[in-house]
Amino acid sequence: MRRELKTPISEEEIRALRVGEMVYVSGKIYCGRDAVLPKICRLIDEGNLGEIDLNGSVIFHTAVSPAGVGPTSSNKVEIEGSFAKLSEAGVKLHLGKGAISVRTIAVLDGCNSVFAIIPPVTALLGKNTLSYRVVAFPELGMEAFYELEVKDYPCIIAAAHNNSIY
């Protein structure tokens, strides 16, 4: 069965996902990694997200460059440390690669959020990326906080409902 998700993602859609399931994501997603995610968490704390709407959103752990996008390791301290705050603020799906901790898996469960791995297929994702723009911290260049419009980004649910493939 092909499971398709379009952003914003509802609570019910997240509850229906299972570990190991293949999912295709379309719509607007945000991109950030270790340089920018702690800054986004500070904006959440300050109540100053501006045009950024995290409700039902997806965060892809990547930088955006002319070469394309590809996942970075989600278990970096700055990235994995952002899961709780971002999930509490409405992020439903975190995309990246690598094993995340049991503690983070429990945090995701408590927020009805999930983590999915996206294979390191930068060249293949190019045709699935329809557009992109910087929405915060442009001074960080390719590590700024980006919004992408995507179609059929492939991913595999790696952590959901206190279960993990790791």
Image: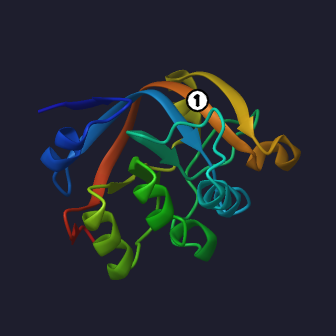
| Label 1 residue SS | strand
In the image, 7 versus 72, the foreground residue is: 7
Residue occupying the point 58% across, 46% down: 70
Residue farthest to the top? 130
Residue occupying the point 20% across, 55% down: 20
Tell me the kind of residue under disc 1: Leu
Instruction: Describe residue 157's horizontal placement relative to residue 50 as left or right.
Output: left
Q: Which image quadrant is residue 6 in?
A: top left
In the image, 121 versus 86, the foreground residue is: 86
Please state the horizontal and vertical placement of residue 150, each as a whole percent of the image.
Answer: 49, 25
In the image, 76 versus 93, the foreground residue is: 93
Relative to 42, does residue 106 appear above or below in the rendering?
below
Please state the horizontal and vertical placement of residue 25, each as a whole percent of the image.
Answer: 37, 32
Please state the horizontal and vertical placement of residue 81, each as a whole percent of the image.
Answer: 54, 72
Residue farthest to the right? 139
Q: Residues within 10 Å of mark 1 (few under 14, many from 20)?
A: many
Residue occupying the point 76% across, 32% down: 66
Please state the horizontal and vertical placement of residue 21, each as a whole percent of the image.
Answer: 19, 48
Q: Which residue is the site of mark 1?
A: 148
Residue occupying the point 35% across, 80% down: 103
Please identify the quadrant where the N terminus is shown.
top left
Please identify the quadrant where the C terminus is shown.
bottom left
Relative to 55, does residue 37 appear above or below in the rendering?
below
